[in-house]
Every structure is written in structure tokens, then in C-alpha cells.
Image: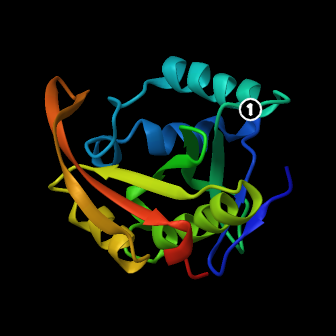
Amino acid sequence: MDPLIGNLTTLREFRPTDLDDYLAVAGDDRVTTWMAFDSYDRAKAAEALAGIIERSAREKRPDHMLAVTRRDDDRVIGFARLAPSGPWGAKLGYAIHADHWGHGYATDASRVMLRFAFTSQGRHRVTAAIGPENEASIAVVKRLAFTYEGHLRDHVFTNGAWRDSLLYSLLENEYAD
């Protein structure tokens, strides 16, 4: 798959050489406190990265988990994921390394993934499930014109406890690039 280009970010396939950068994101408690998984150690990050690369090579790939880089640097600063949700829907997920928060990278990467979802993938609906305390991520989906749909109780078990999620969605006819 060719890289997807945004205003601030490039989304590309992961490579085995991205392990250190991937671990810096997926192994950082500041980031994973908001995720649906606990922080990875090096072995778990290597296993996860190998799985991402293996899935991306399949003819019918089950998801699109892409590395997020800045436009001016090929180092991974995060990831964005688009996973099918029924025949016409998809779930959006994203994470940016804490040292890069507040620069618009999550918004830009999400905008790129939405363009991919609604144009290349022909999706009708994209959802995002976000922890209620994750104000920055809620701001991202609001900037992208997502609509709040509801509160999912005990939706994710992470960091040793059940966590609620707030569900947001964007429909194809509401999407504006």
C-alpha cells in the first residue's frame, strides 16, 4: 500500500526496523493509559509489530494499522488503525507518542484515515470509542465533526480495571476532507 499523506503526517506500513519507535509509543504509560491495552515490554512490542506486518501482507488484510510519521521525518511517532466493523463500517483508533502531543498529529492522522475509509475503502460509517477522561482524543473527533452516540459501560479491560468508553461516529455523507 502506498503511503497516505496528510498536511502534517504521513501514514505508511510498519517495518521491522520500527521496533524501537513502536515500543516508545506502545510501551509508554502516558499513552497506554488511554488505550485498550496495557503498556508493552520489548518482547510484547516485537510480537505485536510482527503481527501488524504479517496482517498487512495478507491479500485480504483484516485491518489497516499504519505507522504515523511527521512529513519531514520518517521516524514513527504513533500509529493509526482502521478496522472493519460490519460490511460498511469501520473503527478508528490512533495514538501519538506523548512527546508529540499538542501539535495536531492525531487530528491530521485521523483525517487521513477518514479519507482512506470513505474513499478507498467505501465505508459508510466510522466510529471511535474513547475513554471519558481522554479530553484530548475527544477534542480530536469533535474537530473532525464526529457525533456523540452514547456511553459504553465497562467497555474495555485495561491497566487492571474496566473502563467505560464514549462512542462517536461519522457518516459518509457528513465527511468533509
Q: Nearer the viewer, residue 123 or 137?
A: 123
Residue at horizontal 70 percent and vertical 73 percent from the top: 71
Residue 42: image location, x then y, percent: 51, 24
State the image quarter where residue 163 is shown.
Answer: top left
135 with respect to 44 (left or right): left
Label 1 belongs to which residue? 61
Residue 119 visible in the displayed image: yes
Residue 32: image location, x then y, percent: 33, 41
Residue 67: image location, x then y, percent: 65, 50
171 with respect to 13 (left or right): left
Dot 1, crowdedness within 10 Å: few (<14), some or many (≥20)? few
Mark 1 residue element: loop
Q: How many marks?
A: 1
Q: Nearer the viewer, residue 132 or 7?
A: 132
Please say if 138 is above or below 55. below
Q: Nearer the viewer, residue 146 or 69?
A: 146
Q: Amino acid at mark 1?
A: Arg
Residue 106: image location, x then y, percent: 47, 66
Please say if 113 is above or below 33. below
Residue at horizontal 21 percent and vertical 29 percent from the top: 159
114 with respect to 6 (left or right): left
Task: Point out the image quarter for the C terminus.
Answer: bottom right
Q: Nearer the viewer, residue 112 or 149?
A: 149
State the image quarter where residue 137 is shown.
Answer: bottom left
